Amino acid sequence: MKIARVIQDDKETFGIINGEFFFRTKSNTKNKIHTLQELIILINREINNSSNHILKVDSFFEEIGYPLTSLKVLPPTTEKNKIICVGINYPKLYDGNLTTKPDHIILFSKFYDTLVGNKQALLIPKGKAKLSFDYEGEIAIVIGTPGFNITEEHAAQHIFGFTLFNDGSVREWQNHSIEAGKNFYSSGSCGPFIVTKDEILSYNELNFETRLNGKLVQSGKLNDMFFDINKIISYIANIMPLNTGDIIATGSPEGTGASQTPKRFLKEGDEVEISSKGLGTLTNTVKKI
């Protein structure tokens, strides 16, 4: 099942995607769904408790779908959710040297307004920051069942699904601080939707590719990560509680603009495309503010 959050008729709504159509939640159901988190809770419960959850959940959505081309697709998360990212989680070149596995998982956070949805524009920062604006294709985990002090053995039980993620970065500002370089307004993206875990046969076999103007620049598989999904979830959940809808971006492999020779940072008119056979395609063009 594919869960999406969109703007329709100038109002935010959420629902499911089937093919090229969006089916929003019904407004006249007895138990009306008010938020994306409530929708995730409902579907997550049915996935965990029933083998035929689709039949039960379908009754909450309208029968008439709307073409995706008529809607503005938003990132499948909200201002209330945490967006946590893992750094240096793949072997890759960093300042000319091949990275080795860190002693510990490296974390940083992003704010909600750093992200745009599918087919929305990434904004080039003003001033000197525009000279080192970069992309990072990733797969992100979406939390379903909340938890705190989660063990590695139970980590998978807290997954709701997966989505694609572009950890937009301003490299020069990362030298100021990681938080500064990772949090420029509308510099990254997430989406196009959440794919529920029941559609993924093997989490660690998920793979993805990043293309810049049609050219393959990144290729990654979760099985290649230094720290796997269970370790990541457990590590974070022993620091802070994880809540329904929280996003965990799992890291980016070799091939970012900063690792190329010469360096190839983003410029106006570029198109960044992150794709996965199981998770769809996240496409964004680059433009000036």
Image (tube, rainbow, N blue to C red):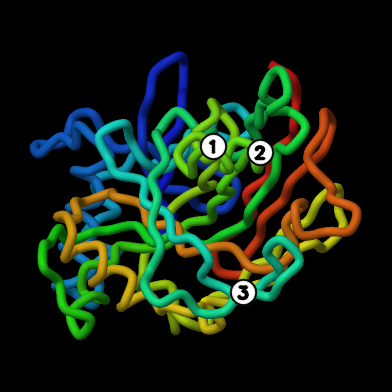
Q: Are marks 1 and 2 in contact (CB under 8 Å)?
A: yes
Structural distance between the alpha carbons of marks 3 and 1 = 21 Å
| Secondary structure under the numbered disc 1 in the rendered image | loop
Label 3 or label 1, whichever lies nearer to me, is 1
Structural distance between the alpha carbons of marks 1 and 2 = 7 Å
Q: Amino acid at mark 1?
A: His
Q: Residues within 10 Å of mark 2 (few under 14, many from 20)?
A: some
Q: Residues within 10 Å of mark 3 (few under 14, many from 20)?
A: some
Q: Residue at x 25, y 72 (%)?
A: 52
Report which residue position mark 2 lands on. Answer: 172
Q: Are marks 2 and 3 in contact (CB under 8 Å)?
A: no
| Secondary structure under the numbered disc 2 in the rendered image | helix
238 vs 82: above or below: below
Q: Which mark is residue 99?
A: 3
Report which residue position mark 1 lands on. Answer: 176
177 vs 156: above or below: above
Structural distance between the alpha carbons of marks 2 and 3 = 19 Å
Front residue of 96/147: it is: 96
Q: Residue at x 29, y 62 (%)?
A: 160
Front residue of 158/133: it is: 133
Q: In the figure, is residue 132 to the left or right of 215?
A: left
Q: In the figure, is residue 284 to the left or right of 27?
A: right
Q: Amino acid at mark 3?
A: Thr
Quarter of the image for residue 78 reads: top left
Q: In the figure, is residue 138 to the left or right of 61?
A: right
**Sequence-earlier tag: 3 or 1:** 3
**Sequence-earlier tag: 2 or 3:** 3
Tell me if residue 195 can be seen.
no
Residue 243 % position (x, y): 18, 51
Q: Residue at x 82, y 28 (%)?
A: 268
